[in-house]
Amino acid sequence: MKRIAIVEDNRDNRLLLSAIIDDRYELIEYATGRVALDGIRSDPPDLILLDISLPEMDGTEVLRRLRADPALARIPAIALTAHAMRGVRERLLAEGFDGYVVKPIVDEEELLDTIARLLESGVSPASSAMPAVAPAVAAVVTRPTSPVQAGEQPGGQPDGAK
Ligand code: MN
C-alpha cells in the first residue's frame, strides 16, 4: 500500500482527510512543519499532502526544504489551502507543488484522482528517473476547476481578511 504523509495542524482537517483516504493508502500524520520534515527525512512517504498555513514553518518553506534534499526532492506534494483564488494556485505550482486542493474539501473524488495521478506518474522516491513535475502539473492545471463544485460553495473565502 502506498504511503501518504499528511501535514496539517488542524485536527478536524486531518480527521476529514484520513476519512477520505485511509482505506486506499497508509497515512502518516504530522501536525507541524518541523516535525514533518524530521519524519519525512527518516521515513519518506510516496506522496505528501501539505497544508500551507502551519505554525512556525509554513508549507511553502517545508516544500522548499524537501526540494533541496536530493533524497526527498521528487516526492509529489499537493498543497492544501483555504485560498481558492487563481493567482494562489499558479504561485503554488510555480513554487514546486505538484497539485493543489482547496479546503474544505468538497470533492473527494478530485482529491483521490489527483493523488492517484501523481502516484502513477512515477515521481516517488522509489523511481528516480523522471523529471520532477511536468506530467502531473499539466494534468492538474488543465482540469476544469469550476468555482462551484457539485453545487456547493468551495471553501475559499474571498480573501477579504488578508
Ligand atoms: Mn493550517
Image (cartoon, rainbow, N blue to C red):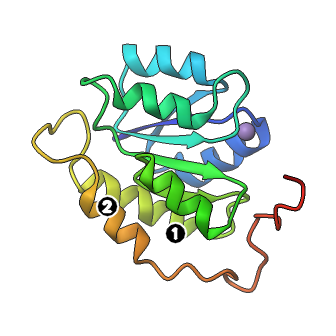
Question: Residue under circle 1?
Answer: 110
Residue 61 - label: none
Contact (Cβ within 8 Å) of mark 2 with mark 1? no
Q: Dot 1 lies on which element? A: helix
Tell me the SS state at disc 2.
helix
| Ligand 1 sits in quadrant | top right
Mark 2 Cα within 10 Å, few/some/many (few <14, many 20+)? many
- Which mark sits nearer the N-terminus, 2 or 1? 1
Under mark 2, the amino acid is Ala
Separation of marks 2 and 1 at Cα, in angstroms: 14 Å
Q: Position of residue 87 (x, y in %)?
A: 60, 65
Going by the picture, which residue comes out furthest to the right? 161
Give the residue drawn at x 47%, y 34%.
63
Under mark 1, the amino acid is Glu
Q: Is mark 1 within 8 Å of ligand 1?
A: no
Residue shown at 74%/71% (left/top)? 154
Residue assigned mark 2: 136
Q: Position of residue 48 (x, y in %)?
A: 46, 39
Q: Is residue 42 above or below residue 103?
A: above
Q: Is residue 149 above or below residue 50?
A: below
